[in-house]
Image: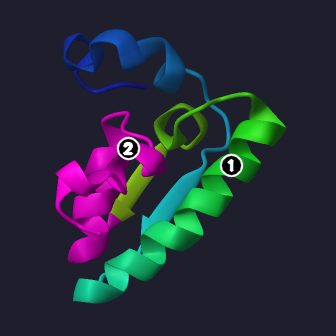
């Protein structure tokens, strides 16, 4: 049951159903975020191949992290792909 259904907007139908959820948690670690991005790029390719969904936010219900992981998680949760994140214009890598 949603506490304030109006705030959920487009996500409302996704979370109204009582079902198991998928959660993705990313650890921080400063510059080690570059390693995290490399690993995520491969996982994203596997998830896309398996599910047909191109972004983590379409496959996972919750994406969270700490420190650098939180920055990466926020971008993934907003729909950015790992490939886009690794682009030189993004500043990390």
Corner quadrant of residue 54: top right
Relative to 70, say whether 23 is above or below. above
Q: Which residue is mark 2?
A: 84
- In the image, 38 versus 75, the foreground residue is 38
Which residues, given as a range, are shown in magenta? Answer: 65-93
Q: Earlier in the sequence, mark 1 or mark 2?
A: 1
Q: Does 89 appear in magenta?
A: yes
- In the image, 56 versus 34, the foreground residue is 34
What residue is shown at x 37% (from left), y 77% (from top)?
34
Location of residue 5 in the rendering, given as x and y in whole percent from the top left corner: 28, 15
Task: Classify mark 2: residues with Cα within 10 Å, few (<14), some (14-19) or many (20+).
Answer: some
What residue is shown at x 38% (from left), y 33% (from top)?
79
Find numbered disc 1 in the image and state the secondary structure of the residue it sits on. Answer: helix
Tell me the CA gap for discs 1 and 2.
13 Å
Relative to 9, say whether 85 is above or below. below
User: Considering the image in quadrants, where does the C terminus appear?
Assistant: bottom left
Relative to 60, say whether 6 is above or below. above
Q: Residue 66: in sight, yes or no?
A: no
Task: Classify mark 1: residues with Cα within 10 Å, few (<14), some (14-19) or many (20+).
Answer: some
Q: Does 68 appear in magenta?
A: yes
Report whether 58 appears left or right of 52.
left
- In the image, 60 versus 79, the foreground residue is 79
User: Considering the image in quadrants, where does the N terminus appear?
Assistant: top left
Q: Which residue is mark 1?
A: 45
Total tally of numbered discs in the picture = 2
Location of residue 29 in the rendering, given as x and y in whole percent from the top left corner: 29, 89
């Amino acid at each position: 049951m949603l506490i304030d259904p109006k705030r959920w907007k487009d996500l409302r139908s996704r979370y109204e159903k009582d079902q198991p959820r998928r959660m993705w948690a990313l650890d921080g670690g400063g510059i080690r975020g570059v390693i995290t991005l490399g690993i995520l790029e491969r996982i994203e390719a596997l998830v896309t191949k398996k599910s047909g969904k191109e972004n983590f936010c379409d496959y996972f219900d919750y994406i969270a992290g700490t420190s650098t992981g939180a920055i990466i998680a926020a971008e993934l949760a907003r729909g950015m792909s790992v490939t886009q994140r690794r682009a030189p214009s993004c500043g990390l890598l």
